[in-house]
Amino acid sequence: MAALGTATNTLLPRPILPKYGVLNCTGWALLIAGTVLNLAHPMWRQSRPPLTLPIVLLVLAIVLVGTVLALALYNISFSYIQPTTASLLNAFEPLSATLFSVLLLGIPFTGFDATGSLLVIVAVMCLTLDLRKYFRLLRRR
């Protein structure tokens, strides 16, 4: 599902971005995703913390900076780089999140983190290899 979501997030907006703009595409993407997610986990059935000013400000910061700004910048990148390059760079996001969690928040680095990091690196390496070049080398030998 993650691979399907990444492919959809990378390839679908490219043809419509020049016509409708980054903010419109980002807004509609977040609205559709939120609506679909709300069908699976209705918001009125979830427990809510008390609404204090610090909690509201933190939620706003997460929504605006961590979601809207991040997706808008990702969509803007399609004007400068190919979608495949953007998705490969996006694959390193879990590595940076793990690294910053360990360095800035003091979260312990476990074996699962090391395994996941290694799998991300191996997957990106496999995707960037030019297999035709290696097959030609094998045929020569």
Image: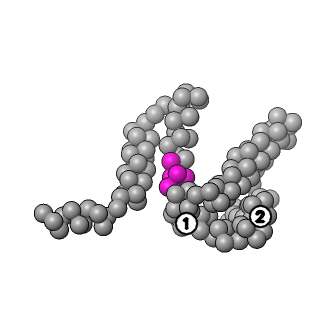
Taking the spot 34% from the left edge, 62% from the top edge, the residue there is 130
Taking the spot 66% from the left edge, 72% from the top edge, the residue there is 15
Q: Is residue 73 left or right of residue 86?
A: right
Q: Amino acid at mark 2?
A: Gly
Image position of 99 with respect to 132: above or below = above
Which x, y percent locates residue 104? 58, 28
Q: Magenta segment: does it hold 86? A: no
Q: Which residue is tagged 2?
A: 21
Whether residue 80 is visible, yes or no, is yes
For the residues bearing labels 2 and 1, Cβ distance under 8 angstroms: no
Q: Residues within 10 Å of mark 2 (few under 14, many from 20)?
A: some
Q: Secondary structure at mark 1?
A: helix
Q: Specify the quadrant that holds the C terminus.
A: bottom left
* Residue nearest the viewer, comparing 15 with 108: 15
Residue 37 image-quadrant placement: bottom right
Whether residue 42 is visible, yes or no, is no
Q: Amino acid at mark 1?
A: Ala
Q: Residue furthest left?
A: 141
Image position of 97 with respect to 10: above or below = above
Q: Secondary structure at mark 2?
A: loop
Which x, y percent locates residue 93? 55, 47
Q: Magenta segment: does it hold 88? A: yes
Q: What is the span of residues highlighted in magenta in the rendered image?
A: 87-92
Which x, y percent locates residue 29? 72, 64
Task: Report the disc number at residue 7.
Answer: 1
Taking the spot 56% from the left edge, 62% from the top edge, the residue there is 83
